[in-house]
Amino acid sequence: MSAAEPITKSQLFLLLIQVQIGFGILYLPNTLQQTAKSDGWISIILAGCTVQLVIVLYWLLLRRFPSLSYFELTKKILGAHLGYIFNVITYIYLILTSTYILIASSKLVKNVLLTFSPHWAIGFLLLAVCIYLCSSNLQIIVRVFTILSVSIMFVILLSFLSFSLPIEVMNLTPVGSSGMSNIIKGLKESLLALYGFEIILFLYSSARHKGKTFLKVITFSNIFVVAITVYLTVIAFVILNPAMINQLKLPIVYMFRPLHFNMIDRIDLIFLPLWSIPVVMSIVVYIYFASHWKTTAPKKNNYFVYINGAIVYVLFLLASKSDQSFELYAKYLNSISYVVIFMIPFILLLFSYILKKKEHPS
């Protein structure tokens, strides 16, 4: 992206909330019912606080090297060889995450919307659209995300319709009844649903406003996502009883099914595609930055985009063969995500202070 076209505050905010909002939120009430139960909303807030702490650590690291990309920053702090190893690990994470989102998206589309369409075809079409957009520059990608942010507003408006259903607020009481240990277990599951904030690492050098302004924007984006997650989870808990939430894999989608209107019969079939748009498009961001880990030359980047697209699709076919293979894939991704999202940035921040590495103004 050229220096003449940096990312504005509004573009940064809209991009981050769409990347951070994922399919995991739709499954979250069911997942939390196994641990924190009706106190799941507390787990989400604690997870949001954890994310905010990590975001501040990211900011402390990135502001020391305002003009360097994340892949350049690692080499600047740790040297060419160790920095290269960290970059390879980060690259692998970006590719694995792209594949995971593609599998989850195609499974959901097939199970709910296109039940008779082959799984491989749905995945191929979704990926083809993402690759086409990946081949453009970051400014175009950001503009597309800005336009697609309208879908988030529609989702929020649709959620208001659920208030016409019977609501049982007592489902949330007594507060704290599940115990602190179960709330902490729920925190881990909630944290997984909030992943996507790590993209901040790759955006600082392209942002128009850096320093404290950048921190404010990424903080507000995290607060917005956490608020939406708590809001939808609480709605699911007060509309559906605990037994139903325990049985339903997608409680947030299911709670829209009883809603019927003269012009619209199935609200859930409108809600899900609107929710899917930003989630699927987040694949674009992951593949885009995975394709920039070695070079900034546009022609070479396009070459890497197509190569990475092919790798993602092969992994998609292998990991989606069965539920067992997908669970194993998710397990490996979960392990590497802790390394890339938490460990590597912390190591970089620590060594940048120990070695007194900092970008000096020219």
Image: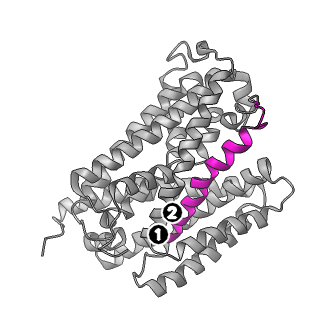
Q: What residue is drawn where x is 68% and y is 64%?
A: 126
Depth check, front residue: 12 or 321 = 12
Residue drawn 48% across the image and 81% down it: 301
Q: Name the residue under label 2.
A: 144
Q: Which amino acid does label 2 sit on?
A: Val
Q: Is residue 19 left or right of residue 205?
A: right
Residue 361 visible in rendering: yes
Residue 116 x/y as whole percent: 87, 56
Check the image and report above or below for 138 versus 62: below
Q: Where is residue 222 in the image (x, y as percent from the top left)?
A: 41, 44
Q: Which amino acid does label 1 sit on?
A: Ile
Which quadrant would residue 76 be assigned to in this image? bottom left
Which mark is drawn over residue 330? none
Q: Residue furthest front?
A: 263
Range shown magenta: 260-288
SS for callout 2 = helix
The quarter of the rendered structure image containing the C terminus is: bottom left
> To which residue does mark 1 refer?
140
Q: How crowded is mark 2: few (under 14 residues within 10 Å), some or many (20 or more)?
A: some
Q: Do the residues labelled 2 and 1 touch (CB within 8 Å)?
A: yes
> Is-magenta flag for residue 287?
yes
Q: Is residue 94 above or below residue 113?
A: below
Q: In this view, does 84 lie above or below 158?
A: below
